[in-house]
Amino acid sequence: MRLAKLIRRTGRVAEPAPELSTEPAGAFRPDRALAGSAQVRHVDCGSCNGCEVEVGAVFGPVYDAERYGARLVASPRHADVLLVTGVVTQNMREPLRRTVDATPRPRVVVAVGDCAVDGGVFRDGYGVAGFVDEVVGVDLTVPGCPPEPEAIVEALRRVTGR
Amino acid sequence: MSGVSAGIATQLVLAAVALVAATLAPARMRSHVAGAACAGLGVAGAVTGLVAMSGGNPGAGLQIPVTLPLGLPLEPLLLAPDRLGGVFLALAGAVAAVTAVYGIGYATGPAASRSGWAAFAVFILGMQLVPAASDVVSFLVAWETMAIGSTVLLLADHGARSEVVRATQWYAVMTHASFLLLLAGFAVLVAETGGTSFATIAAAGVSGTSASVAFVLLLGGFATKAGLVPVHVWLPRAHPEAPSHVSAAMSAAMVKMGVYGVLLAALRLLPQGPAWWAGLLLVLALASALYGILQASVATDLKRLLAYSTTENVGLILVAVAVALLLRGAGDEPVADVALTAALLLTVSHAAFKTVLFLGAGAILHATGERDLDRLGGLAAVMPTTSLTFGVAALGAAALPVTSGFAAEWVLLQSLIHGDGRDDVALAILLPITVAIVALTAGLALLTFVKAYGIAFLARPRSPAAEHGHEGGRSMRAAMLLGAAAVVGLGLAPGPVAAGLAEAVGASGIEVVGVLGVSLPAVDALLDPVALILLAAIVLAPVVVVHLAAARRAPRRDVDLAWGCGGVRVSPRMQYTATSYAEPLVRVFDDALQPSRDVEVSHADESRYLVSQVRFRQRVTDLVADRAYEPIVRATLGIGEGARRIQNGSIHRYLGFSFTALVLVLLAVTW
């Protein structure tokens, strides 16, 4: 009963849904199989955890990406989309490859944050193997250090089309 | 000449043919010719049994006009199975036929030798004559024929493995202890009644102390054959060492002769026993069921596991018999009849699935040379037929629908739950305990056979031998498929089977209902597997249609790699083994099993903090065998050692012995 009251008092905290952008993002064409609903697996390849905070916010109550059909899952076996953050370190190169291989096709790899897109501030570091596009192919990029949650949500909405 | 006597004569002739074939056929064709003859012998037994079961003309049989040159009041030898004997004759014949067919492809080396096949024929004949025998002398002769045949078969591989000799010693001693007890028990009965035929003994109605002495002696003898705790010790030793078609026949049919013996004693010869007989039987049977399945659940040797599971199943069968006797004593006839039917259903069902399980274990042994579950795995890919049949039989052993095991255990539980023990204090206490133990047994059996099937056939091979497994020959596969079909068939049609078996023991109130289903009006219960399957199919049909339609719309998505959490070290050693699967059980039943564990950690040279190797060893021994039998064995050996001191080979001492004996005799005479 107290819970019900709390829910009523809190109400809706999510940001109003912005318009779905229609302009094409590079060469990316969303696959029809993933339209409407896409399961997301997040892979941290050596991030400073800045992007993680933003990814956490994306699936929180305020930005609420689940409204648009994107849902976090616990294993690449269940996933359609891989959300890769951070520059790829030597130790994470092989696990990242295996994670991508273990994701059923059709799959979408989204590089989130400057480090994932082009190495960012850690580029040419001694433990760095490269950025994500060098290790596995990238379909969508979300630049920013860290990127704003709206940008990540927009990338996911391009996949789900909602 | 009636059908039954013709059938028994045919069996004797076929046994002679099999013996001739085994001894005269050239080595290349021996297995085919002798195997076919043995299979024929089995089929003849099965048909005769079915005829006797339907009770065409009671009392008909083969009378053997033999007068033994003894001053004993022996009645003529009579091989005339009654309806109960017919059940066991049919069962032994069917098992013998299937195992003989299997043996054609399986037997190699010593098992395919002249003596191997001849002993197999003798063994089968003995086994089929035991339930046919209708008087004490022919019963004991058939019993001993069966014992000798199986002992010779057990010895087959004694040249290759030293354990075989020890196992055979155990078996020979136990089986002859059983024979001695039977001899003593029957001697008491014959002395009381003055006749050797079962009809005379039954008509005399022995009662009082001598009846109790006879019953306990007979129970001891039959329990030894049936493998009840604490006289089960030969089972886990003999079964692993025998050739697999022999262990299948021994486990599926021969131990059933022990069950037949108990039924013969309790129902036909001494039907008016006091309640404590049944109580004694119930306690022994419950102990066997629980102890057997507990040992089976922690066993890693596949055939040892199956042997202990035999002890468990015989325990369950005799639980049903004991409960039937108790209920009959308490006046609850209808439920007693249900329990008696359950006993026979369990017997038939165990014979079916245990044959397949042992034959499957034989196929694995044939293909990989391994019996150790910890070194098997992944066989489903290389041995599809064995995997299928073993899986079906494992379902039967775990008493899951739609197999024979499920139907049989369902009937047993119905009789246990509905047994009316209100007026009988002992029954009121015993029945709930029995239900609880049977339930625990069923649960452990499920775990055991999940382990047996899952570890042997699924996952990745744990040794190179398992990796290079291959399917056995055509006759082996045919035999296993035949057995698996029987497991499913008996489970799908419990109605006619139960009705037929109930008629054979004179039980009423078992009816066929619906599509081959069984109805028990006495306990107001009904089971119709075929109808249930049809119903399930109708319910599931829309689901399947929707699923197929959905699958058409969203095609299968490819995955390039099985997910290993990003890891790279995927090896067969990371899988569950039989030992690790049973580890929680070993922990729970620590006090009952008392396993010995040994963990050895060796460190790297550089530092004590680095572990280079961990060796874990666990041994679960049979406590009953250790505690009860080791002292006896040690005492016997001690007497032998003492006797050796007297017999030192010196001729002077032997002359001294004779002289002393002579003097003593003279003294005794002149006293």
Image (spheres, rainbow, N blue to C red):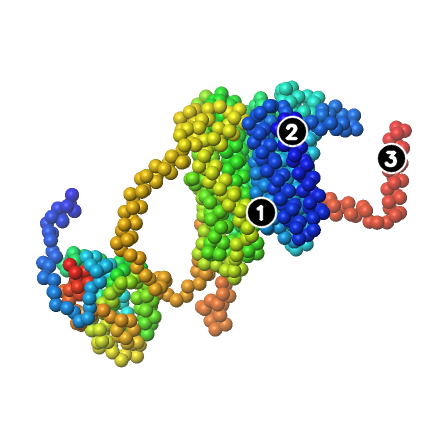
Q: Which mark is residue B653?
A: none
Looking at the rendered image, the quarter that the C terminus of chain B falls into is top right
Label 2 sits on residue = B5
Q: Which residue is mark 3?
A: B664
Residue at the (16%, 47%) spot, across then down: A3
Label 2 SS: helix
Closer to the observer: label 2 or label 1? 2
> Horizontal placement of A72 versus B126: left or right?
left
Give the distance between the C-alpha atoms of the residues marked 2 and 1, in whole angstroms: 28 Å
Query: In the rendered image of this protein, does residue A145 appear above or below residue B426?
Result: below
Which residue position is annotated with label 1? B102
Q: Kindly identify which chain the residue marked by label 1 belongs to.
A: B
Counting from the top left corner in percent of width and height, residue B482 is at: 52, 43
State which mark lies toward you, 3 or 1: 1
**Picture quadrant where residue A86 is located:** bottom left
Binning the other alpha carbons within 10 Å of mark 2 as few (below 14), some (14 to 19) or many (20 upward) gives many
Please tell me which of labels 3 and 1 falls first in the chain: 1
| Marks 2 and 1, the one that precedes in the sequence | 2
Distance between mark 2 and mark 3 Cα atoms: 56 Å
Residue type beneath disc 3: Leu
Q: CA distance from mark 3 to mark 1?
A: 61 Å
Q: Quadrant of the N terminus of chain B?
A: top right
Three-letter amino acid code at the position of disc 1: Tyr
In this rendering, the answer to whether A27 lies above or below B199 is: below
Disc 2 or 3, which lies upstream in sequence?
Answer: 2
Q: Return the residue found at the far top.
A: B204
Q: Crowding at label 3, few (<14), some or many (≥20) Cα neighbours within 10 Å?
A: few
Name the residue located 29 percent from the left edge and 49 percent from the top edge.
B547
